[in-house]
Every structure is written in structure tokens, then in C-alpha cells.
Amino acid sequence: MSLAEATKAITEGARTRIPPAAFAVMEAATAKLAASGLTGNALKVGDRMPDFELPDVMGTMIKSLDLRAKGALLITF
């Protein structure tokens, strides 16, 4: 299954679990983001993620470079 197919399946599953009014708000927000042109700046398949540093739940700074050194790093939002 491709990522696009998996995403579509997740969306359709959510549509059955989320109240229609709430789902409509989510769809409107997604459409607004797409119309903003923001997706033009997003990383594409095969692009290298820029290095970054963020705090974990305990406030300790974690570097993406250190995580990648341990293996593959997948980040989703």
C-alpha cells in the first residue's frame, strides 16, 4: 500500500469516527493550509531533513543528528 493509499484509508476511517461537524472543521483547515502555498515549501520524497534540536518531555535537548546515528528517523506531524 502506498503512502497516499494509507493516508486515504486513515482519512476515511476518521470520517466514520469523528462527528461530521468536527470533521468539516478539520477539512476546512486542511484546505486552508493547502491554499496558503505552504505545501510548496514542504520536504519532498527523497529530500534530506534539516538538522534540528528539540527538548524531550523532560526538557533535555535532543539532536536529530544523534537520533539518525542510531538508525532511521521518521518524523510525522
Image (cartoon, grey):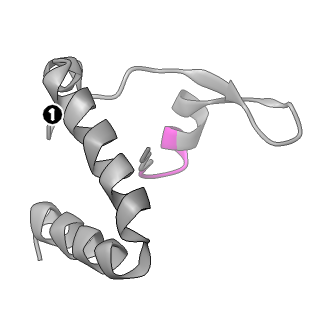
The reply, left or right, for residue 43 in relation to residue 24 is left
**Rendered residue at 15%/33% (across/down):** 44
Whether residue 43 is visible to the viewer of this picture, yes or no, is no
**Rendered residue at 23%/26% (across/down):** 42
The reply, left or right, for residue 26 in relation to residue 56 is left
The outermost residue toward the right is 58
Which residue is identified by label 1? 44
For this rendering, which residue is in front, 59 or 19?
19
Whether residue 52 is visible to the viewer of this picture, yes or no, is yes
Task: Give residue 10's position: percent from left, percent from top.
Answer: 29, 72
User: Looking at numbered disc 1 in the image, what kind of residue is underneath it?
Assistant: Lys
Task: Give residue 61's position: percent from left, percent from top.
Answer: 76, 26
**Rendered residue at 76%/38% (across/down):** 56
The reply, left or right, for residue 5 in relation to residue 63 is left
Q: Is residue 20 above or below residue 47?
A: below
> Which image quadrant: the N terminus?
bottom left
Q: Which residues are magenta?
A: 68-72
